[in-house]
């Protein structure tokens, strides 16, 4: 090693005159140290990537991310997965479909592309926890606009109807909210993740195909309150159970007031025990280390029956190090309650 270091350093020695101050000796030592570090850089980088890959493949549990407006929940999940694979130096799922080990990542509850807020994510064996855990309550802040209806029941759709709203008061809205509280029946939107013959209703609608309205189904609203009313806009705070559509709620409120209404803004502030303010990781914190810390924190919030102990069959770190290719696997369920990629 000493010969290699001297060979690398020799071009840097341009003045062999004695230096009683010791400056030359210090410079030479620094150069030798830098050269040695450079020689080790390649192997250290490989070791670092291998360690990150092992850590990534060992992650299991449930955590929350902050979904912004724009991407669908599935698109955001793909973005998260790509970032983690890139950090660990692993190939993307689309790069090669040969499977040695699979990184499983799933979300438990679709948020519309125009909506933002908490999206709960399962990784590894945590994907198996999503169905049972996320049947719990969710909380939303929704802003609706009176006097206007759209085909999608939100601001992304085409206006289909306009009605007067000028006589509607804050007391009118507060007076009807009780009708939408408790165990009620709700007709889901045509533009939704519900499926017909294996295809989303929203996909069929965008193709211009005729889609029949789904029958009303039972849903639960734990609480609903009016936060603000500034005609034609009104803002609601809603806590509900699984399978509930805020878009349908706002539309039904408009009809109950002898007008119409559509959703302008929608934010999910809570899903299960996870809140937007305290638990949802923004995209700049989608790193292996940050997610590992978040998994540890979030696990403590789950009911004991939903936590799991390490299985004897769980891959060891050595097995994780051998992974060469990561593939994309998707589990689709009615209403996209759980989606695993």
Image (tube, rainbow, N blue to C red):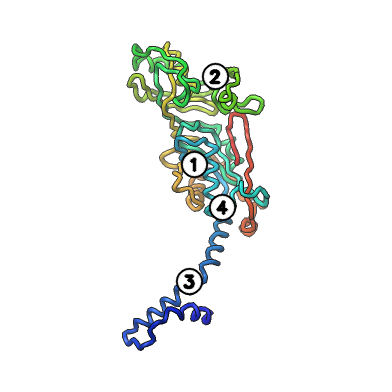
Looking at the image, is mark 2 or mark 1 earlier in the sequence?
1
Location of residue 160 in the rendering, given as x and y in whole percent from the top left corner: 47, 17
Location of residue 150 in the rendering, given as x and y in whole percent from the top left corner: 47, 20
- SS under mark 2: loop
Q: Are marks 3 and 2 in contact (CB under 8 Å)?
A: no
In the image, is residue 202 above or below residue 27?
A: above
- SS under mark 4: helix
Dot 1: few (<14), some (14–19), or many (≥20) neighbours within 10 Å?
A: many
The N terminus: image quadrant = bottom right
Q: Are marks 1 and 4 in contact (CB under 8 Å)?
A: no
Is residue 216 rendered to the left or right of residue 117? right
Say which residue label 2 marks: 187
Q: CA distance from mark 2 to mark 4?
A: 41 Å
Say which residue label 1 marks: 64
Is residue 316 rendered to the left or right of residue 286? right
| Residue drawn 42% across the image and 42% down it | 278
Say which residue label 4 marks: 56
Say which residue label 3 marks: 37
Q: CA distance from mark 3 to mark 1?
A: 39 Å
In the image, is residue 80 above or below residue 198?
A: below
């Amino acid at each position: 090693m000493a010969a290699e270091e001297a060979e690398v350093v020799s071009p840097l020695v341009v003045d062999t005159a004695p230096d009683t101050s010791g400056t030359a000796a210090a410079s030479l030592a620094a150069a030798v140290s830098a050269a040695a570090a450079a020689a080790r850089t390649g192997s250290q980088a490989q070791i670092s990537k291998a360690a990150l890959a092992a850590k990534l493949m060992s992650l299991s549990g449930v955590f929350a991310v902050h979904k912004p407006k724009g991407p669908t929940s599935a698109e955001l999940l793909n973005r998260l997965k790509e970032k983690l694979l890139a950090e660990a130096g692993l190939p993307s799922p689309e790069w090669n479909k040969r499977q040695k080990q699979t990184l499983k990542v799933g979300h438990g509850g679709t948020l519309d592309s125009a909506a933002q807020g908490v999206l709960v994510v399962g990784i590894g064996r945590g994907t198996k926890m999503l169905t049972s855990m996320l049947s719990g309550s969710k909380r939303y802040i929704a802003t609706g606009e009176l006097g206007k209806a759209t085909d999608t029941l939100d601001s992304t759709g085409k206006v289909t109807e306009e009605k007067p709203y000028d006589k509607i008061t804050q007391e009118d809205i507060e007076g009807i909210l009780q009708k939408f509280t408790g165990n009620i029946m709700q007709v889901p939107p045509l533009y939704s993740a519900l499926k017909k013959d294996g295809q989303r209703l929203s996909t069929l609608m965008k193709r211009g195909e005729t889609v029949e309205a789904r029958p009303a189904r039972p849903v639960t609203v734990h609480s609903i309150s009016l936060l603000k009313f500034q005609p034609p806009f009104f803002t609601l705070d809603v806590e509900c159970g699984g399978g509930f559509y805020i878009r349908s709620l706002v539309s039904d409120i408009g009809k109950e007031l002898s007008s119409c209404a559509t959703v302008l803004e929608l934010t999910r502030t809570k899903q299960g025990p996870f809140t937007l303010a305290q638990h949802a990781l923004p995209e700049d914190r989608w790193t292996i280390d940050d997610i590992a810390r978040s998994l540890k924190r979030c696990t403590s919030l789950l009911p004991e029956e939903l936590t799991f102990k390490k299985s004897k069959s769980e891959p060891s770190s050595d097995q994780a190090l051998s992974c060469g290719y990561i593939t994309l696997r998707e589990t689709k369920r009615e209403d996209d309650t759980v989606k695993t990629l």
